[in-house]
Amino acid sequence: MRGQCPARILGSDIVEVLGYRSLDEHNKTDLPVKSLDGFLDIIELKLPNASFWNADNSPAADLTKATMQCAKYLQVAEKKQNDKDKVKELGCDILKPRITLIYGRSNDWDDTQKEQFRSLNSLYHNINILTYDLVLKRAKRILDFSE
């Protein structure tokens, strides 16, 4: 799976999807990527049909679990920043990695949920949450620009 990201729909600063996914013997990422500045970032994928909100528009338990998984990946990756063998395996340097979590759908959200989503994303440091609908919207926009 090593190679360039088609149309960079996962982020404009991604230059390559890396082939080696393990951070350590217990933690395997979905899509480790090399950023424009040459450092490791991670794309974590969950199911598009995953429940995003509870009835009171607070994050669903599975979303909280997914963000905690991302936080753990950040912690494990940072511990590996001076591991020359891990850097060689990955094919890029490790320093303050960022994670994009792609989770659930947002095409039927109301204004309150959109505001909650914006607020939720503002709480995290080095974790960005996108929905599959937002990724699709980005892809369509990129295609419009290229035509």
Image (cartoon, grey):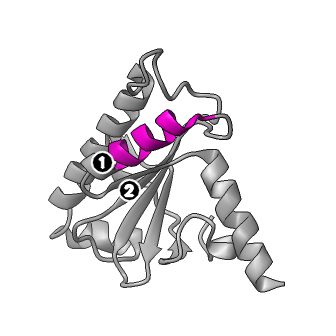
Q: Residue at 63% of width from left, 46% of height from top?
A: 132
Identify the residue position indicated by label 1 in the image: 73
Residue 7, quarter of picture: bottom right
Q: Residue 74 versus residue 141: which sits nearer the camera?
A: 141
Q: Residue at 74% of width from left, 82% of height from top?
A: 145
Label for residue 52?
none
Q: Give the range drawn in magenta.
A: 109-121
Residue 38, quarter of picture: bottom left
Amino acid of disc 1: Tyr
Looking at the picture, how far across and down is residue 30, in whole percent? Answer: 50, 49
Is 39 left, or right, of 145 in this rendering? left
Is 57 left, or right, of 69 in this rendering? right
* 33 drawn magenta: no
Q: Residue at 63% of width from left, 64% of height from top?
A: 1
Looking at the picture, how far across and down is residue 79, in whole percent? Answer: 15, 57
Task: Determine contact: label 2, label 1, CB under 8 Å.
Answer: yes
Label for residue 99?
2
Q: Residue 94 versus residue 55: which sits nearer the camera?
A: 55
- Outermost residue on the right side: it is 147
Neighbour tally class for label 1: few under 14, some 14-19, many 20 plus, Cα within 10 Å: many
58 up-or-down from 96: above or below: above
Q: Residue at 38% of width from left, 65% of height from top?
A: 41
49 up-or-down from 145: above or below: above
Q: How many marks?
A: 2
Label 2: which secondary element: strand
Amino acid of disc 2: Ile
27 up-or-down from 13: above or below: above
Neighbour tally class for label 2: few under 14, some 14-19, many 20 plus, Cα within 10 Å: many
- Outermost residue on the front side: it is 111
